Image (cartoon, grey):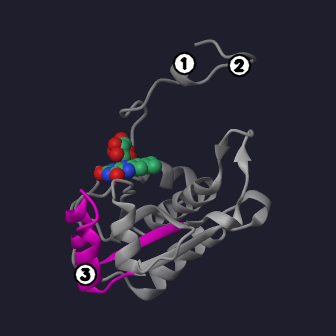
Amino acid sequence: MDVLEAIRAYRPCTQYQTRPVPAEQLKRVLAAARLAPSHHNLQPWRFVVVQDDEQKRLLAQASNRGRLIGEAPAVIVAFAVEEDIPVTIGGYISAYPLDVAVAVDHLQLAATSEGLGTCWIIDFNEEKVRHVLRVPEGIHPIAIVPIGYPGEPNGGSRPDGDGRKSPDEIIAYNEYPW
Ligand SMILES: Cc1cc2nc3c(=O)[nH]c(=O)nc-3n(C[C@H](O)[C@H](O)[C@H](O)COP(=O)(O)O)c2cc1C
């Protein structure tokens, strides 16, 4: 599957089979995240893979999307190391979650190409996630990503206009027209 095919094929996965994700497949998905570009190549990301049932149960309690976290055979929690990236975007907004977001997108597209389903969850309680996974200060959970074989077919390749704004609504040339 090439990258455009993976982009079209990706849908947030809301049902997971219980069968485990083979370790080699998980490694390939994490390798894609590791290869993501980052500001000054600082790589301010860390990934914790949660497969232990009790840890997943506790993590599920930290989110309103707990069903997905509990159901998926594995959950990848992506963190930003704040001190690794003490810069702002354009001088006005902290940049530390940005690189992690790029890495998570790599991860999700790689998972899609492996036939795996994922869903990006930011609807969680930071303190609870920190407590369950024993995360030190200065490290911030950015995304919780359940990963596993989809419980049902995801509808296939996304057609044009599938819930997305039209090009005219979001793309312009030479000046900002909206
Ligand atoms: C940065 C980001 C955060 C998201 N957070 C959540 C979340 O907390 N809970 C959830 O159920 N889905 C979450 N999603 C999935 C989006 O809701 C989903 O991609 C969006 O509704 C578009 O759905 P579609 O891709 O099927 O059109 C998130 C997606 C992104 C990219």
The numbered mark, 1 or 3, whose residue comes first in the sequence reads 3
Where residue 170 appears, as percent x and y from the top left, is: 55, 24
Q: Is residue 65 left or right of residue 138?
A: left
Q: Residue at x 36, y 57 (%)?
A: 121
Q: Which residue is mark 3?
A: 19
Q: Amino acid at mark 3?
A: Arg
| The label number, if any, that marks residue 173 in the structure image | 2
Element type where label 1 sits in the image? helix
The numbered mark, 2 or 3, whose residue comes first in the sequence reads 3
Marks 2/1: CA distance? 10 Å
Q: Are marks 2 and 1 in contact (CB under 8 Å)?
A: no
Q: Nearer the viewer, residue 158 or 28?
A: 28
Which quadrant holds residue 32? bottom right
**Quarter containing the C terminus:** top right
Magenta span: 50-79
Whether 78 is among the magenta residues is yes
Element type where label 2 sits in the image? loop
Q: Is residue 124 left or right of residue 110?
A: left
Q: Residue at x 59, y 76 (%)?
A: 31
Q: Which residue is mark 1?
A: 168
Q: Is residue 149 left or right of residue 30?
A: left
Residue at far top of view: 177
Where residue 29 appears, as percent x and y from the top left, is: 51, 73
Q: Amino acid at mark 1?
A: Asp
Depicted 18 relative to depicted 111: above or below: below
Which quadrant holds residue 74? bottom left
Q: Are marks 2 and 3 in contact (CB under 8 Å)?
A: no
Q: Judge the density around disc 1: few (<14), some (14-19), many (≥20) Cα neighbours within 10 Å.
A: few
Residue at far front of view: 137
